[in-house]
Image (tube, coloured by chain):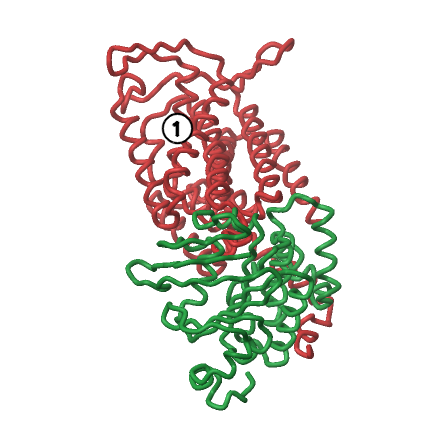
Chain colours: A red, B green
Amino acid sequence: MTRLFPWVALAVFASIPLWLHDPYLLNAFITTGIFIIAAMSLNLLLGYTGQLSLGHVAFFGIGAYTSALTSLGFDVELIGGLRVVHEPWPVWTGLVLGTLVAGLCGYIVGKLSFRVRGAYFVIVTISFAEVVRLVALNWVELTQGPLALTSIPPMTLGLPGLGYFDFYSKQSYFYLVLAIVVISYVIIRRLVYSRVGRAMVALKENESLAVSVGIDVTRYLVLAAVVSAGIAGAAGSLYAHYLKIIDPDVFLFLYTITMVIMVITGGKGTLAGPIVGGLIFGFIPVVARSFAAPEVQWILYGLFMILIVFVLPQGIVPAVENLFTARSKAEFPASPKAKIQDAP
Amino acid sequence: MLEISDLVCRYGKVEAIKGISLSVQRGQLVALIGANGAGKSTTLRTISGILPSASGRMVFEGEDITRCSAREILARGIAHCPEGRRVFPYMTVEENLEIGAYLRTDSAGIEEDRDRIFTQFPRLAERRRQVAGTLSGGEQQMLAIGRAIMSKPKLMMFDEPSLGLAPNIVEQVFEIIEGIRKTGTTVLMVEQNAYAALEMCDYAYLLEAGTIVLSGNGNELVHNNHVREAYLGGDGRRHC
């Protein structure tokens, strides 16, 4: 049953655009999906290596800006009169470049900060996000600053021999986001269940012990940071081509907090956690909107969050898993504990 | 096999080890005894590369390992079985053993060694899919030892293997260590239970406040007056 569950969930989500025609709700699904991708990437760092990146939105924003600028083209003058002109490229290259550039930034931040880790990593990531935001705000020639990058083209995919397909309708964009969710899920799953993933879990459980069994801690943390940042960058790219306008507000701390909330409430260190948490906190504002005043909506959001953290401190997914394993354990009356006690 | 000379190790400004020299010959079981805070665990942690040394030299099989990382030291064949039955609590018994072989690439050999550990410790075999945190103290210590064996070390270091275990389990653990030595693996052991350690070792060093104050074979130290008064409870007859 548990093996089948991801497939059932996928089938249910894939069917949504077939019966749901309300554009507002579809829009909510798409933006929630984009944030779920970002939350999944954060979960790789926070849940599996135990490192809290409070500047994760930086990678999201870098992906968004890189992708938008790749597809829009730019013409900037660097220091020393060096002019860099970039002609617009096909939009899908923006998605690829956004992922790569964000991944590269993840590498740099990881290399710099993982020698110290813990609180220092948190500080480095916050500062990094803030610096990138200020660059986006002030490098007007490149980013238009607060005027925002506008008329970002919709995502298009060139298929050789089949022409171009553009994801202009909400239905098609929904499938694009769903596809990237699935790809990210598969990448993270493969990573976590590999030798590398076990090393990550080992160093989260007990770092000095992990070192003593020969795990190169810094290397695996950097690897996790690169993959995590790359996926966040892909989410940013999807965001840019969906909204078709981005300004330096994509670097707001609020978005990082949203991702952290999704991961923590859903269950960090579980594959499904960020998806469950993302759906809940993506849809609370949508649902609350129908019956509550704007100020009450956010109070509800906060209340719900506090409630989950208090009642299910490990998150929703681990709690549900425990419920299932507790049941299956109850079927075996001979507990292994009994044997331990009469050990010689 | 292992030669340490004038090793100094600091925690910040505090010198935990103040220039110790010791040597371990191939096939020996060497014990490091001393009171709490004497620097025994620090010595092992420095040898295994988890802590950096401030000065001094460590040579293993003719090669200088003073500046090597923990990973390189393990790869050269020094395994460390840390204090307090350290296992990865959320991994299964099997996963704990497999991660002990992290630096090895011969998957056939790894499986063989794992099966050998399971025959040696049937208790672990019974619980192979159980999460390590749910094992009893003695079982966790056996798992920690098994994990260290999995790296196929030439020199195995034990840090307080008897700490916090029931007396009958303590004896079992010491038997296991004797067994490891008999298979040809050199052992360096830190132990508070001075009597037991001196009884089984070939050579012992007594560490006090970061310096080695005495050394000799086990028998010599057992009959040394200073050792008897300070560590063996007066007449040196008390066991455990």
Label 1: which residue? A62
* Quadrant (top left, top right, bottom left, bottom right) of the N terminus of chain B: bottom right
* Quadrant (top left, top right, bottom left, bottom right) of the C terminus of chain B: bottom right
In this rendering, is residue A319 above or below A83? below
In this rendering, is residue A53 above or below B130? above
In this rendering, is residue A180 above or below A300? above
Q: Residues within 10 Å of mark 1 (few under 14, many from 20)?
A: many
Q: Amino acid at mark 1?
A: Ile
Which type of secondary structure does the marked residue at label 1 adopt? helix
For residue B112, side relative to residue B67 (left or right)? right
Of residues A231 and B160, the one nearer the viewer is: B160
Q: Measured from the top left, where is residue B139 in percent x and y?
A: 63, 69
Of residues B198 and A309, the one nearer the viewer is: B198
Of residues A211 and B228, the one nearer the viewer is: B228
Residue shown at the point (59%, 65%) measured from the top left: B28
Of residues A38 and B140, the one nearer the viewer is: B140
Q: Measured from the top left, where is residue A176 in percent x and y?
A: 56, 26
Residue shown at the point (61%, 14%) measured from the top left: A159
Q: Measured from the top left, where is residue B14 in percent x and y?
A: 30, 63
Q: Quadrant of residue B166?
A: bottom right
For residue A96, side relative to residue B95 (left or right)? left
Q: Which chain letter goes with mark 1?
A: A
